[in-house]
Image: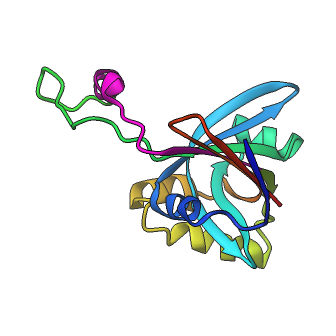
């Protein structure tokens, strides 16, 4: 395992964060973990990496973040096999996932990010700024933006990334910490 002390993420990690649509978010409360697939926006200021998310206030992840701000995120550049249709000719996401599991090919890396989540006060200028960045992320489609970002019941969450662990297909691990 290689350990590098620096604030900046490697360029291939920032490219990955800028090019993917979803991240897996892990939260916990009272030693009970919870994982969610999330739209996100990557943002960096003064070489500090941030992840912007939004979530309804009536969710497990929101309550977990209120109680315990330590979170973990997972993103990868794995690619599934060809886009096949279910036998009926209709696309079925579950069928596609199961049919393509054995065809899945790991291109390069998985990246785990650890950080501290902060629920942004909706009355603050920060809220408007981070919500605007998230809304203008071209990887989030309009329907999802309406449901998961613009909804009045949703909060904006800012995650400050504290560490990054990159694992490649040979199980070689690099750790970056701030």
Which corner quadrant holds the C terminus? bottom right
Q: Nearer the viewer, residue 149 or 151?
A: 149
Q: Nearer the viewer, residue 31 or 110?
A: 110
Q: Hey, which quadrant is residue 112 in on the image?
A: top right
Residue positioned 21% across, 32% down in the render = 91
Residue positioned 45% across, 61% down in the render = 19
Report the label total: 0
Q: Nearer the viewer, residue 122 or 91?
A: 91
Q: Which residues are magenta?
A: 95-114
Whether 99 is among the magenta residues is yes
Residue 43: x and y in percent read 64, 69
Residue 145: x and y in percent read 48, 59
Q: Hey, which quadrant is residue 171 in on the image?
A: top right
Residue positioned 42% across, 37% down in the render = 106
Eyeballing the image, is 38 above or below 89?
below
Whether 108 is among the magenta residues is yes
């Amino acid at each position: 395992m290689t350990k590098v002390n620096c604030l900046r993420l490697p360029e291939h990690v920032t490219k990955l964060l800028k090019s993917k649509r979803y991240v897996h978010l892990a939260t916990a409360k009272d030693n009970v973990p919870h994982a969610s697939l999330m739209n996100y926006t990557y943002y960096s200021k003064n070489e500090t990496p941030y992840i912007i998310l939004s979530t309804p206030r009536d969710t497990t992840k929101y309550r977990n973040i209120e109680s315990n701000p330590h979170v973990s995120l997972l993103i990868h550049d794995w690619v599934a096999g060809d886009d096949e249709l279910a036998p009926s000719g209709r696309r079925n996401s579950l069928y596609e996932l199961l049919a393509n599991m054995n065809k899945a090919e790991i291109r390069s890396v998985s990246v785990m990010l650890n950080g501290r989540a902060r629920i942004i006060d909706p009355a603050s200028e920060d809220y408007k700024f981070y919500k605007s960045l998230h809304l203008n992320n071209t990887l989030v489609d309009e329907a999802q933006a309406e449901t998961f970002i613009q909804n009045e019941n949703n909060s904006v969450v800012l995650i400050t990334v504290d560490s990054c662990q990159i694992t490649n297909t040979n199980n070689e691990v690099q750790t970056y910490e701030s």
